[in-house]
Amino acid sequence: MRIHREGYKYILIATVLWVLLGIVSYKFFYSVPLLFWLFNFICFLLWFWIIWFFRLPSRVFSEGEEQVIAPADGKVVVIEETFEAEYFKDQRLQVSIFMSPLNVHVNRNPISGEVKYMKYHPGKYLVAWHPKSSTENERTTMVIGSPRADLLVRQIAGALARRICYYVKEGDRVKQNEEFGFIRFGSRVDIFFPLGTKIDVKIGDVVKGGVTVIAHLS
């Protein structure tokens, strides 16, 4: 397991804060050892959680031209037909994956192809499962075109997520399972498929980015 590059700054800040708080807590709690160790244990748990959040585990990726691989770790919370208003402007099959603060937060390309559309939208920070989060929250919209289908992938910030990172631009050629972005501290990823696409997951399933096959393209 490695640490994702997006986490270096936060881990450094957390380490420095823990050291400073440790010094301060010693001055205040030196006469009460139990409180000193309890306080520092809580600081350790927070420090460890930040390291755990930015982990980048080694994985054996799934691959296939007709397969759509999960772009994120998390739980499938939506599978429904909906109107996609930003790019396609027609009915699409939406699959949404909720990423809790305990999940790996790397986002990966579900298919290989060309980035036909990429746009960042500043916005609010409603909870990720709020019905309006997909249109009002901070988010990015990416469309990957392939010979089999065009897929729209949307990163959506949640109530805790305050920064969406993305590494691609329009015209880029991308490969399945390569990183295209990262969302910090809780979020959601939506994928919009053509109607009639065979979906291989159901609501409540826990998926792994780069590993779980979530659909097959015709």
Image (cartoon, rainbow, N blue to C red):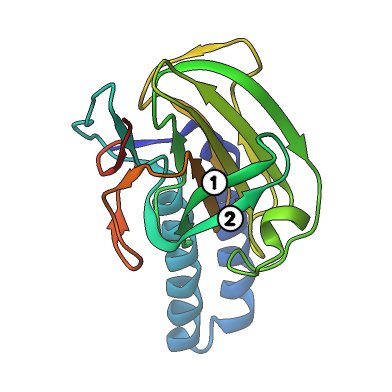
Above or below residue 37? Residue 32 is below
Q: Residue at x 25, y 39 (%)?
A: 211
Q: Amino acid at mark 2?
A: Thr
Element carrying mark 2: strand
Q: Which residue is mark 1?
A: 92
Give the label on residue 82, or none. 2
Q: Is residue 92 above or below residue 110?
A: below
Rendered view: 45 above or below 187 = below
- Asked whether the residues under the numbered discs 1 and 2 touch, taking CB atoms below 8 Å apart as contact, a structural biologist would say yes
Percent position of residue 28, x then y: 63, 80
Label 1 packing within 10 angstroms: few (<14), some (14-19), many (20+): many
The x, y position of residue 117, in whole percent, is 66, 23
Location of residue 119 in the rendering, given as x and y in whole percent from the top left corner: 73, 30
Q: Nearer the viewer, residue 38 or 130?
A: 130
Q: Earlier in the sequence, mark 1 or mark 2?
A: 2
Please identify the quarter of the rendering in which residue 2 is found. Answer: top left
Residue at 58% across / 55% down in the picture?
82
Question: Picture quarter containing residue 122?
Answer: top right
Residue nearest the observer in this picture, 165 or 193: 193
Percent across and percent down for residue 177 are 36, 27
